Image: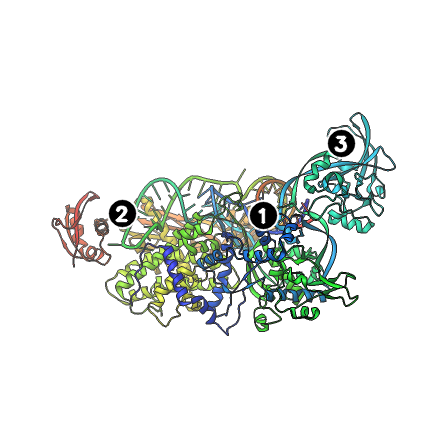
Amino acid sequence: MTFRSVLPRLDVSSMEENILKLWKKQNVFKKTVEQRKGKPEYVFYEGPPTANGRPGVHHVLARAFKDMFPRYKIMRGYHVSRRGGWDTHGLPVEIEVEKQLGFNNKQQIEEYGIDKFNALCKDSVFTYIQEWERLTDRIAFWVDLETAYVTYENEYMESVWWILKNFWDKNLLYKGYKVVPYCPRCGTPLSDHEVALGYEEVSDPSVFVRMPLVDKPDTSLLVWTTTPWTLPGNVAVAAHANVDYVTIERDNGGTKEKLILAKSLVEKLFKDEEVKVLETFKGKKLKGVKYHPLFTFLPPNKPAHFVALGDFVTTDDGSGLVHIAPAFGQEDMQLAKEHDLPVLMTVLPDGTFIPEVTPWRGVFVKDADPLIIQDLDARGLLFRTEKYTHTYPFCWRCHTPLLYYARDSWFIRTSAHRDRLVELNNTINWVPDHIKSGRFGNWLENNIDWSLSRERYWGTPLPVWECVDCTHRECVGSVAELSEKAGRDLSELDLHRPYVDEVHWKCANCGGKMTRVPDLIDVWFDSGSMPIAQWHYPFENQEQFARQYPADYICEAVDQTRGWFYSLHAISTLLNDEVSFKNVICLGHIQDAEGRKMSKSLGNIVQPWDVLNVHGADALRWYLYTASPPGQERRFSADLVGDVIRSFTLTLWNVYSFFVTYANLDNPQALTVTAPTNDLDRWLLSELNVLVRDVTQAYETYDVLNATRPVEKFVEQLSTWYVRRSRRRFWKNDSGADKQAAYSTLYTALTTIAKLLAPAMPFLAEELYQNLVRSVDQTAPESVHLADWPETMEEFIDETLNREMQLVMRLVSLGHSARQKANRKVRQPLASAAFSVSTPAERKAVSTYAEVIADELNVKQVRLLDASTEALAHTAKPLPKQLGQKYGNKYPAIQKAILAMNAEEVAKTLHSGRALVVEAGGETYNILADEVEVKAMAKEGFAVAEEGAYVAALVTDLTPELAQEGLAREFVRRVQDLRKAAELDVADRIEMFVEASAGLRSAIEAHKDYITSETLTSNLYFATPPEKSSIVEDEFEGEKVKIGVRKVS
RNA sequence: GGGCUUGUAGCUCAGUUGGUUAGAGCACUGUGCUGAUAACGCAGGGGUCACAGGUUCGAAUCCUGUCAAGCCCA
């Protein structure tokens, strides 16, 4: 069998491009789905992105994580249909179009025409779809975009209506007059989860004002607010019943004034100023005290302008007296309801003052803040103004400061199912798990009703019609129902505005005109409906829906906790009393190399293509999987991705290239492993199956780190231990069983790694598979992604062997260390290496693997340090873990006692297998061998290195024979360099001409066979090299040499 | 103000139910080795385990508090 030859130098980009072509040509993605038809279903939901912006690195992150589990599950034999989806509605789209048209308010849209505006929205939704498709393709995120669901399609929207009707019927959909976070520019309320997207730290004016009491004109309430623009809407002042308040007297520009405020804030407010406390009293004494309003633009229609008590009042900031404007604060509105206060609506929906507020009519409220402060100051009502830094919500798309603003608004009564939301959440597997009870769980426990309605244009219309005369309301759950009510066939109707607004019918109560309420619904409701609406359920595809619900796996970034994760969960709970996803990976955000958030304004955004073009998709994916736990924020830079190529990809690639190079020379007959006899083979296969077992387990538990990092570790050991130690086995001239075994073992390792790597590094896995598997077996599945996941072959796992090999590596490392200390280069053979280890099992391992150790350390003999003749002394060290756990607080005394004993006696006792009897603190203890570390120290004359319980001691004296062998190896090394310099192929045979000084010549003659076989020399002449040969002259170890080689045909 | 997360070497990260002198990789320095390797081996420098208390024979690990960063809530 012959493999396609592999260049040791890897061109990542062309390799990946070729694989992409192969997949396309053979339609591999489709086949992965079709091949498993009828098999158990594994359900993945794609959280729909919006294609009206360019995809960034954070999208690659999410898509990489989304991709790996479906790939894994397909290899495990599941049927996984991976349907794509696009989120198409909502403000982000509208805002893009508004920008295009140069609009900045709703009126312009209405004048332009909602139909035309929405048509533009629809067009702009897929502005960057090609960019998305190209990126998705390039990073090998396998998702079916041809059949992707689209949230603006009538069928999708009809299903959303059906869900809303279901909620309506359960009395879960209602209209309320509430203070909502409201964007005055977009002219619409925002849901909590949208508000959460836009908090920013800002500096606002903070003002203290005087509100003179009606009964005591020389005394004023000192009232605090950070929103001066709400003062014209003031109807009351809130105080806390149990807080201590004081009346103080102070000097105000020559006249005395009296102010009321919370006692604990006096110092903070007046600092060094001298004030006289006249009176102290509880807040409840203030109840009902009347004051003169600051403004009288709108006359209140109910009693107002008195002090009311509220629990929400704190004395952390301000004055302990809180200004109340019911139209502009949730707590204010609550208080207003409790005390039957009037609601003064002083602001228009566009965020400007109403005409009645004469001085500032038409001024945007935030802009009016300084004007209002000026006015109060002029009238002597301003006590103080300063800057106050706090976090304040902004519109997540247009960046306008949000106002808390009383609106008629529609809600979903999610709070009615709060407990059930929490219960069902507890059955979901969250990665990382703290999200479950932490961020998401806390959020659910504090659930408030879902603010659903949006007063906008491009979105799913709220299917509620209202009688203009009697306010009778009906909710419509399907197109058929609408047709029936309207009395005409509306199956062709576009369910968007403005068309749906034109449908009317007669009120069943009073015969008035039923008209749709103008609102749209929150786009998060669209995407959260996707399990149902993607199938146009229940109108069609009942079966598909049943098969594809709930999802086994979803994955998005942490910002979706309040977004898609919540909308999916809330809708599913209220609709079906069921979870909509069972496992979820919640990804941390990507930051730049300095740990800052990536943002346009900082100019630190890394474009995915910049990374992909240089390092390829596999390296990028691998980096994202292995760099840090999924839920953690991760710092990102192109350089870090480059490290993946160097440290992992190339290591694997070179093992692969090594295998192919030699296999093509040797043509090994069989490549399946049966019963390995060679220790290195047995070890590699044991570790390989441990790897299969552990990686499989990790995939099963959505543990991405442990599904990937161990593969990297294994490849490193494969390269730096197995292949390095096995090289000569591949070079042997014969084609004996050992060589065959080496090929089979390495082949098995590489093909298994290809499969283990397939979900994470789909390209490299395919490359390995195509060349190693497909090229020799045309009956094998045509892609690694169509292959079955490797089974763990327990019979190959030998944990003892793994431990022993670990020990061997450690001892070898100590041996190298000792060599360096003795300044003996590895090329120089040494007589022997003696080791001291700690347990009988380890002593046995030293002799079992003596050959491997001897070869690696280039010594003639490997043995144990002879305790009686070579060991100078022993040390005995009590082990705190074993002894501490066993004897608790007696440990220090025991430790002291053991250290005080004669170490030679301790060693003798424990080596003989007896327990060590220790007296400490008046008690007797039997200490066992594994509770004390006994270490032998080597006599002089050895080069020694030690670590923990282990000692390596090298005999460094050189006999003439050893020295001669060293020379021979030095010589071989020169010849190999020369071969390389002459650009000979590894398999080329040569003839060699040598002129050497006497000592070297006799060494060469003594080791002629070794030299000729190492260097593939057919003829070795002691003669002057001919001119046409490649020649090198050198001096070493006091010897001189001139070597010439040339290829023989 | 509250919640969640994070803080370990210059960088990226491990660190098990508390237990020997806190580790690895990258980077740096020295040295060795090499006909698979963009490598590899060995050694070295580099640490107040964010800080302060507490529990314990023993704390990077458990508890309390503080500080800093990120996200979220109010």
| Residue identified by numbered label 2 | A957
> Which residue type does callout 3 highlight?
Ala
> Which residue type does callout 2 highlight?
Asp
Residue in view at x 79 percent, y 66 percent: A510
Using the image, name the chain to which the residue with label 3 belongs.
Answer: A
CB atoms of marks 1 and 3 within 8 Å: no
Q: In which image quadrant can residue A860 be found?
A: bottom left
Q: In which image quadrant can residue A550 be found?
A: bottom right
Q: Which mark is residue A255?
A: none
| Residue identified by numbered label 1 | A102
Marks 3/2: CA–CA distance: 101 Å
Q: In which image quadrant can residue A377 be found?
A: top right
Local secondary structure at mark 1: loop
Q: Where in the figure is residue A131, as x and y percent of width and height?
A: 48, 55
Does residue A858 appear left or right of residue B57 in this picture?
A: left
User: How many other residues sit within 10 Å of disc 1, few (<14), some (14-19) or many (≥20)?
Assistant: few
User: How many other residues sit within 10 Å of disc 3, few (<14), some (14-19) or many (≥20)?
Assistant: few
| Residue identified by numbered label 3 | A378
- Taking depth in this image into account, of A899 and A953 the one nearest to the observer is A953
- Taking depth in this image into account, of A244 and A130 the one nearest to the observer is A130
N-term-proximal mark, 1 vs 3: 1
> Which residue type does callout 1 highlight?
Gly
Closer mark to the observer between disc 3 and disc 2 = 3
Using the image, name the chain to which the residue with label 2 belongs.
Answer: A
The quadrant of the image that shows the C terminus of chain A is bottom left
The answer to whether residue A21 of the structure is visible from this angle is yes
N-term-proximal mark, 1 vs 2: 1
